[in-house]
């Protein structure tokens, strides 16, 4: 991210799950408040907790990540994505 302005400032990039294995599912995966001086650029890394991507499977009484393509987006809000991408996740169950 880059502060293209002439003043120091801050922004809060937010990472969202948009679809999970073909099913619409908007969830906030993470965010970080970033302060940048005028003209400063910085790479931001945001890792999602698997429990936020998963759903609870009552039949197994465990958390489950569905196998398939999961779409994510980054923006200032869920309604204003700036970047998007997809990743294939292997299905798994966890927790008890």
Image (cartoon, rainbow, N blue to C red):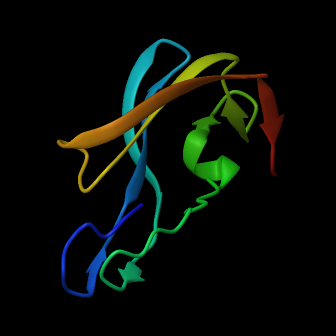
Q: Is residue 17 above or below residue 22?
A: below
- Point 41% across, 32% down: residue: 84
| Residue 79 location, quadrant | top left
- Point 56% across, 16% down: residue: 21
Figure disc tally: 0
The N terminus lies in quadrant: bottom left
Q: Position of residue 50 (x, y in %)?
A: 68, 48
Q: Would residue 71 be found to the left or right of residue 13 on screen?
A: right
Q: Position of residue 27 (x, y in %)?
A: 40, 45
Q: Would residue 80 be found to the left or right of residue 22 on screen?
A: left
- Point 64% across, 50% down: residue: 51
Q: Nearer the viewer, residue 39 or 93?
A: 39
Q: Position of residue 25 (x, y in %)?
A: 39, 31
Q: Nearer the viewer, residue 80 or 42?
A: 42
Q: Position of residue 65 (x, y in %)?
A: 68, 31
- Point 57% across, 37% down: residue: 55
Q: Is residue 85 above or below residue 3?
A: above
| Residue 56 location, quadrant | top right
């Amino acid at each position: 991210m880059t502060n293209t302005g002439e003043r120091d400032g801050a922004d809060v990039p937010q990472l969202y799950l948009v679809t999970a294995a073909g099913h619409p599912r908007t969830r906030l995966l993470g965010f970080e408040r970033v302060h940048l001086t005028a003209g400063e650029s910085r790479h931001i890394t945001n890792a999602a907790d698997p429990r936020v991507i998963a759903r609870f499977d009552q039949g197994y009484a465990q958390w489950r990540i569905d196998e398939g393509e999961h779409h994510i987006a980054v923006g200032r809000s869920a309604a204003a994505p700036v970047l998007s991408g997809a990743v294939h996740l292997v299905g798994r169950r966890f927790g008890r």
